[in-house]
Image: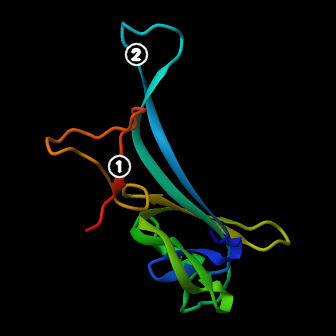
Amino acid sequence: MAKVKGQNLRVYIGSRVIAAALDCQLSVQLNVSAYSTKDDEGSWTKNRAVNLQWSITANAVVTDTQELDAIGVAELTDLIGQAVQVQLNTAGGEKNREADEHLLAGNAILSDVQITAANRQRATAQITLTGKANMLIDLRYLVSADEHLMCSSDGHVMVAAHEE
């Protein structure tokens, strides 16, 4: 397994990389709900999985130049509230903008762009993309022929990536 350096992992919106990016983060979160019955003993809360959600945040330098092969902060602010196609790719080439290996992809809503401009420091922007679909790949439950969910021996419901 090859290691990926931070400068070579880039966020693409559509087919264009975020210009002057500083860092990016992927967050996948499982939301749970507490439940109990009259038969419960002990003081431990029982939880069940409710849903998954994911988001990507990226920080970039605010620039005043337009670059055709990258998407800048000015263009991103025009996309707030819109659904966009997002990819996490390894990249190389000039300015690490040429996509190499496709790691993850999905549809997300550009939900937030925050610009920070501190005195005598470069202005930066934080971009938040909130996922619309099941994580970054299409996951489906594994079911038996009579529509029962398949579970592992330790009680976990099994899922697999769905291919069209």
Viewer-nearest of discs 2 and 1 = 1
Q: Quadrant of the N terminus?
A: bottom right
Give the secondary structure at mark 2.
loop
Q: Is residue 113 visible?
A: no
Residue most extreme to the right? 120
Circle 1: residue type: Val
Circle 2: residue type: Ser
Q: Is residue 132 depicted above or below 36 in this figure?
A: below
**Mark 1, other Cα within 10 Å: few <14 / some 14–19 / many ≥20:** some
x, y percentage for residue 114? 62, 63
Q: Is residue 80 depicted above or below 75 in this figure?
A: above
Please give the count of numbered marks on the rendered protein: 2
Q: Is residue 71 visible?
A: yes
User: Which badge, 2 or 1, is on the more N-terminal residue?
Assistant: 2
Q: Is residue 124 depicted above or below 33 in this figure?
A: below
Q: Nearer the viewer, residue 18 or 10?
A: 10
Residue most extreme to the front? 153
Q: Is residue 106 left or right of residue 102?
A: left
Q: Quadrant of the C terminus?
A: bottom left
Q: Is residue 10 left or right of residue 33?
A: right
The circle drawn on residue 159 is 1
The circle drawn on residue 16 is none
- Which residue is identified by label 2? 36
